[in-house]
């Protein structure tokens, strides 16, 4: 299958004719785009769950119940 | 309906109507001038006045490119295969500028000649390898040969 | 029928179902993206005109064509929101807008990087590029409108309206290259003939990349819609159970 590779050497692959800069900046942007759009929602989810856990813990202490599944009455939003 | 709700609804309706009107009007205004360039036939028909800054688009006629030896000056013919227009340009041409390829030129008409201030290459929608292109050209030549012979031309 | 519809629109139903789909979607995306990228970068032959800048084609075209799906999606979701007040439809619409900003922005940027060496300019005010820029600003407008209106219901309705209006721009972008003179070339026609232009060696890797990028779009939309569901339903029991069971 390696016969089909159109570049004879690695440096040819990097240079992309003489358009290495253009080709690789497009692929770099594409990589950033994909990673950002998968990572950001993942981090937001973690952050949200952390917040909700600490809120549940705090409300639990105020109400004197340890259960995290009690509804949060202090919530106003 | 509560007053503040009524107010918000009014704002929403206002925004929506305003936007639709704005989009509609700009599309209407653009519909005449939205074309990026004139064709050589339009220039020949006198649609552009002398000295007016416009863009023209066409194909670079095969064999028409003449480069100066001591400067970046270049002269070529832009054609839409109905009318030709001589273009004169002093500057760096884009990588895709080739005879037989599309071109969009910015500049002004001056006594039937087009003085360019910027040349852009317009490539077509076809992608193929060097090998496929060579094979197609060879097939084209093989087809053209007997036809030309039978016509006796 | 009505029961089925309201079940379909229930955030919990969507959350559970999308949770089951996600691993498969991610697997499909990883496979198609790997194959597509390697194929496009290593195996596609040098173009007879454009040399190796044809590599940009395999990123630019998938991203740009999928960016055109965002407004129709938001318009349909918006119409459902306006008529049936389905919560899920509005959540999807809300999450699609910023993703659409990304897609349109990347399509514009990759196009500019490609145009700079090939056309001799990174920007020109032709119909295709201008209508695409309009889509970029319309999407930013939808995101801004959402955050500007305090009441979630009013924001949902306003964004739904703007999405329906903005969807008019999509056929304009699509057909701009046929209706007007543009610097941008028309869409590439695909042919089965491997001995002519645009044969399988050109479009097979393109279709693989389109599948990969479509899958990526769906995954990122699902991920942020799930976050939105958790956020809005945080006081319901099933969400609190999820939060309690999740380790951070």
Image (tube, coloured by chain):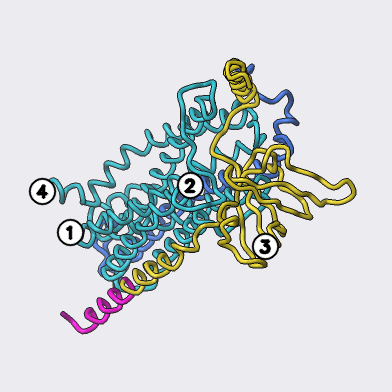
Chain colours: A blue, B yellow, C cyan
The image shows residue C236 at horizontal and vertical percentages of 23, 57
Q: Chain of mark 3?
A: B
Nearer to us of marks 3 and 1 is: 3
* Disc 3 with disc 1 on a shared chain: no
Instruction: Say which residue appears at 33% left-offset and 62% top-offset.
Output: C165
| Proximity of marks 2 and 1: CB atoms separated by less than 8 Å | no
Q: Is residue B151 above or below residue C182?
A: above
Secondary element type, mark 1: helix
Q: Chain of mark 4?
A: C
Instruction: Say which residue appears at 70% left-offset and 61% top-offset.
Output: B111
How far is mark 3 from mark 1, CA to CA?
57 Å
Which quadrant of the figure has residue B21?
bottom left
Mark 1 vs mark 4: which is more N-terminal? Answer: 4
Q: Chain of mark 2?
A: C
Residue of label 2: C64
Mark 2 vs mark 1: which is more N-terminal? Answer: 2
- Is residue C241 or residue B62 the one in the foreground? B62
Which quadrant of the figure has residue B150?
top right
How far is mark 2 from mark 4, CA to CA?
38 Å
Nearer to us of marks 1 and 4 is: 1
Q: Is residue B33 visible?
A: yes
Q: Is residue B83 above or below residue C192?
A: below
Secondary element type, mark 2: helix
Q: Which mark is residue C84?
A: 1
The span shown in magenta is B1-16
């Amino acid at each position: 299958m390696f016969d089909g590779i159109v570049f004879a050497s690695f440096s040819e692959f990097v240079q992309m004719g003489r358009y290495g800069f253009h080709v690789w900046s497009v692929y770099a942007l594409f990589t950033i785009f994909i990673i950002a759009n998968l990572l950001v929602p993942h981090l937001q989810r973690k952050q949200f769950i952390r917040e909700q856990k600490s809120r549940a813990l705090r409300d639990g202490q105020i109400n004197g119940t340890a259960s995290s599944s009690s509804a949060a009455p202090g919530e106003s939003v | 309906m509560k007053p503040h709700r009524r107010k918000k609804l009014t704002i929403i309706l206002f925004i929506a109507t305003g936007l639709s009107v704005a989009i509609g009007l700009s599309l209407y205004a653009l519909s005449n001038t939205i074309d990026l360039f004139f064709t050589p036939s339009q220039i020949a028909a006198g649609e552009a006045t002398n000295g007016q800054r416009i863009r023209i688009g066409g194909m670079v006629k095969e064999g028409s490119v003449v480069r100066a030896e001591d400067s970046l000056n270049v002269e070529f013919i832009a054609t839409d295969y109905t009318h030709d227009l001589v273009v004169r340009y002093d500057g760096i041409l884009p990588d895709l500028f080739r005879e037989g390829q599309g071109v969009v030129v910015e500049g002004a008409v001056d006594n039937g000649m087009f003085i360019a201030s910027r040349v852009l290459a317009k490539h077509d929608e076809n992608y193929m390898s060097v090998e496929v292109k060579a094979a197609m050209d060879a097939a084209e030549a093989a087809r053209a040969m007997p036809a030309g012979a039978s016509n006796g031309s | 029928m009505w029961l089925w519809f309201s079940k379909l629109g229930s955030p919990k139903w969507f959350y559970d179902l999308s949770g089951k789909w996600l691993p498969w979607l991610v697997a499909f995306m990883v496979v198609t993206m790997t194959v597509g990228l390697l194929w496009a970068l290593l195996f596609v032959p040098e173009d007879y005109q454009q040399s190796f800048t044809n590599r940009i084609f395999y990123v630019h075209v998938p991203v740009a064509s999928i960016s055109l799906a965002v407004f129709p999606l938001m318009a349909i979701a918006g119409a459902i929101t306006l008529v049936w007040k389905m919560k899920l439809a509005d959540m999807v619409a809300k999450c699609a807008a910023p993703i659409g900003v990304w897609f349109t922005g990347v399509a514009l940027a990759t196009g500019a990087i490609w145009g700079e060496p090939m056309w001799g300019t990174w920007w020109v005010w032709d119909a295709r590029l201008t209508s695409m820029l309009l889509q970029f600003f319309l999407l930013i407008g939808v995101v801004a409108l959402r955050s500007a209106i305090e009441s979630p219901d009013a924001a949902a309705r306003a964004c739904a309206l703007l999405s329906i209006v903005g969807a008019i721009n999509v056929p304009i972008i699509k057909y701009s290259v046929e209706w007007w003179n543009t610097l941008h070339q028309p869409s590439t026609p695909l042919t089965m003939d491997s001995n002519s232009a645009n044969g399988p060696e050109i479009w097979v890797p393109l279709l693989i990349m389109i599948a990969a990028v479509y899958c990526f779009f769906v995954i990122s939309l699902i991920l942020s819609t799930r976050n939105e569901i958790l956020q809005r339903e945080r006081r319901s029991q099933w969400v609190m159970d999820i939060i309690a069971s999740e380790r951070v």
